[in-house]
Amino acid sequence: MLLGFNILAVLGTLAGGVIPLAKDMLSRQGMWRLFALRSGILLSVTFTQILPEAWAQKESMAGWGALAAFTLLLTMESFSMMDSCPEYLEECSVHVLSWTAVAALFVHSFIDGFNLSVSFAAGSLAGAAVGLALGLHKLVDGFTLTALFQGSGYGRRQTLAGLFAIAVATPLGSFLSHRGLAALSPGPSALLLGFAGGSFLYIGASDVLRRMHKADDKLSLACFSFGMFATAALKGI
C-alpha cells in the first residue's frame, strides 16, 4: 500500500505537469476546494490517529516532534517558497522560482514522503488517508510547478528536469523513512509520529485558513468538512 501511494504521488506530479489540458481542467477556485478537502483529511487523521498514537508511545517526545515540524515548516516558508500551489493560486509576484526555491520544494516533497511512511506506523487507515490527501495535492502540484517554471522563464528541458526531481523526492523520503522505522524504540517512534502530525497540522491549517480568511467560499468549507468527518467516520468516531 505504501509503495502504491508513492507511485500515485510521482505519477500525480508528473501528470499534472505534462498534461496539456490541465489548464482547462483545473481552475484556481477548483484547486482551492481540492486543497480544502485535503486539509480536512489531514487534520482529521492528525487529531484522531497520528497524534494519539504518538502520545501513547511517549508524550514528551510526541510533543517535541510536533513542535519541531511546525517550527521548521514555518521557518522555511518565511525564507523560501515551500509549496508551489498557494504561490500560484495567490498570484504572488514576490517569490521568484530560483534554484534555491526549487531546492526548498524538493525538501518539502521529501518531507511529504517521509511523513507518508511514518503515517502507516499509526495504522493502515491513517496511512491510506494521508496517501489519498498527498495524491490529490500532487496532481495539482505538478501543474502549478510547470506554470511557475514557465512563468519564470525556464525552458521545457529545465522545467521537466525540475518537475522530475521534485516528484522523485517523495518516494525517496518515504523509502529512507521506511528503512529506519522497523527497529525504532517508542521514544524515537513517538518523535517521528509527532513530527508527521505537526507537519500535517501546519499544512492543513495554513491551506484552509488562508482561503477562509480571504473569500466567502462555502463550497471550500463544505469540502473541508466532508474530508474531516468522512475520515473520522471511517475510524468509527
Image (spheres, helix red, strand yellow):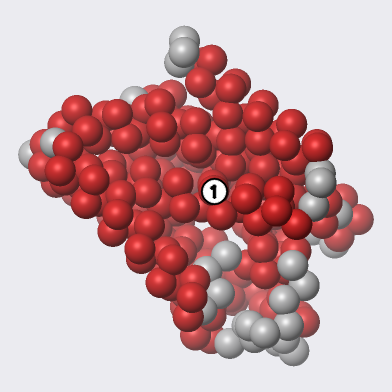
Quadrant of the rendering where the N terminus is positioned: top left
Residue 183 horizontal/vertical position (percent)? 11, 40
Residue 207 horizontal/vertical position (percent)? 61, 52
Amino acid type assigned to the residue bearing label 1 in the image: Ala
Whether residue 17 sits left or right of residue 19 in the image: it is left
Image label count = 1
Whether residue 168 sits left or right of residue 123 in the image: it is right
User: Residue 52: in sight, yes or no?
Assistant: yes
Q: Residue at x 54, y 15 (%)?
A: 233
The answer to whether 229 is drawn above or below residue 215 in the figure is above
Residue 227 found in image quarter: top right
Front residue (pair 186, 207) = 207
Q: Secondary structure at mark 1?
A: helix
Estimate how packed mark 1 is, as few (under 14), some (14 to 19) or many (20 or more) residues with alpha carbons within 10 Å. Answer: some
Residue 101 horizontal/vertical position (percent)? 53, 80
User: Residue 171: in sight, yes or no?
Assistant: no
Residue 150 found in image quarter: bottom right
Q: Residue at x 72, y 76 (%)?
A: 92
Q: Residue at x 51, y 21 (%)?
A: 232
Q: Which residue ends up furthest to the right in the rendered image?
A: 24
Look at mark 1 in the image and give the residue it sits on.
205
Q: Residue at x 70, y 53 (%)?
A: 213
Residue 58 horizontal/vertical position (percent)? 14, 36
